DNA sequence: CGTTCAGTTGACTAAGGTCAATTCCCGTGG
DNA sequence: CCACGGGAATTGACCTTAGTCAACTGAACG
């Protein structure tokens, strides 16, 4: 269930034919670890799909980095607010490992939308899933302790500690790496 | 710019005619302070528009309440995740003052969507603005201190302290009322 | 008036931050 | 094959922010 075609057809309900049309405009992009897919200040002109690898979106404030999200294999990646508004993005998109992405350029995406109403399903799927994900994170940031957020993350992405460093996980959780280290050491004692 | 018709026509780009069609299905609902528009566990079957008054959405955890959002006059209100998925809502919607709302029932909304593609604009406006708002709050919760969030809130809604109690503002900020009280007392000293 | 609820203040606690020292791990070059 | 260098993670000591609980003030309203 981690490839683009399956998600389009099985999850979103589009047809093989749609996938073939999409394939024609998809651009395959290879990123090395630490490469940027998008830098803050630029307009996001694409929707990406991660074939292989990991990315993060983060914002900078007073010289510190804050990870807004971490994107694993099989997920869509975009600075969606910037994509929607076509205004400069406040966040950066950066690879945390060597990564392969399929890119749908904004222009081609608009063409697809015009070609048939079916692509509306895709836009709605994207908007809805992103919204729901944001709501969950908002609630978690508001109601859960750092320890609870850490456990939730492990439950959602059991493999994440093998894929990204503690620095990035801590930043995503809203704490410092030192604090995450302490949380982990306590976790073992309490089980 | 606080009434439904103006937003529909000037902001979303629909026509007078659309507004007239919508008017036929709108239900006017009066809530007293502390009345619930939606209780957790129920499915949200409407989009509301606040004609007059204030509401909050909040979740409960371990007996504590956490305000997810506060909705003022002229804004849309819904448990949008529940509305989208037609699954039970995790959050509650409650009036914080006597409130008048226009309700678009889910069923009628679906009918409108079918009647003409133009209503797609409405759905997209709603989804996009809600998403952007969530992103801003997510970033603020992650990167700003309670004091910064408090200042941001006052800047965004200067009138909010006249409309809702400190208890609700504190909960929205993710802190306790006592802490907000201390933040306020320090604020005056530092200006 | 007295009750009730919102807000403030004080004393203490807990969670997480900061900074510095140390250890672990892993890749690279001699 | 080993030694070393550098980033990642851990640990310790101390600081800051916010939470907790209880007492108190004050305005609102029956």
Image (spheres, coloured by chain):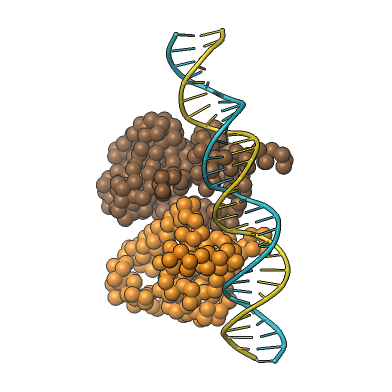
Chain colours: A brown, B orange, C cyan, D yellow
Residue for point 56% across, 79% down: B33
Residue B132 position by quadrant: bottom left
Residue A19 position by quadrant: top left
Q: Nearer the viewer, residue A56 or D4?
A: D4
**Residue A96 coordinates in the image, percent (x, y):** 44, 35
The answer to whether any part of residue A118 appears in the image is no
* C13 w.r.t. B172: above or below: above
Q: Nearer the viewer, residue B161 or A160?
A: B161
Residue for point 29% across, 38% down: A24
**Residue A62 coordinates in the image, percent (x, y):** 41, 48
The answer to whether any part of residue B30 appears in the image is yes
Counting the numbered discs, the total is 0
Q: Quadrant of the C terminus of chain B?
A: bottom left
Residue for point 49% across, 76% down: B163
In the picture, measured across the screen, residue A132 lies left or right of residue A120, that is right
**Residue B133 coordinates in the image, percent (x, y):** 42, 60
Q: Nearer the viewer, residue B133 or A116?
A: B133
* D4 w.r.t. A87: above or below: above
In the picture, measured across the screen, residue A182 lies left or right of residue A23, that is right
Q: Quadrant of the N terminus of chain B?
A: bottom left
**Residue B80 coordinates in the image, percent (x, y):** 48, 62
Residue for point 41% across, 31% down: A33
* B79 w.r.t. A160: above or below: below
Q: Nearer the viewer, residue B69 or A74?
A: B69
């Amino acid at each position: 269930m981690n490839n683009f075609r399956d998600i389009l057809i099985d999850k979103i309900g589009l047809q093989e034919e749609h996938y073939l049309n999409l394939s024609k405009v998809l651009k395959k992009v290879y990123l090395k670890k630490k490469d940027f897919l998008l830098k803050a200040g630029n307009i996001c002109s694409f929707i990406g799909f991660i074939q292989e690898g990991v990315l993060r979106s983060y914002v900078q404030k007073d010289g510190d980095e804050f990870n807004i999200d971490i994107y694993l294999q099989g997920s869509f990646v975009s600075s969606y607010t910037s994509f929607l508004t076509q205004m400069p993005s406040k966040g950066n998109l950066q690879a945390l490992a060597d990564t392969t992405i399929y890119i749908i350029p904004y222009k081609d995406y608009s063409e697809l939308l015009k070609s048939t109403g079916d692509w509306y399903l895709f836009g709605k799927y994207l908007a809805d899933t992103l919204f729901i994900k944001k709501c969950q994170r908002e609630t978690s940031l508001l109601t859960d302790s750092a320890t609870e957020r850490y456990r939730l993350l492990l439950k959602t992405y059991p493999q994440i500690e093998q894929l990204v460093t503690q620095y990035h996980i801590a930043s995503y959780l809203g704490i410092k790496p030192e604090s995450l280290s302490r949380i982990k050491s306590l976790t073992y004692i309490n089980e």
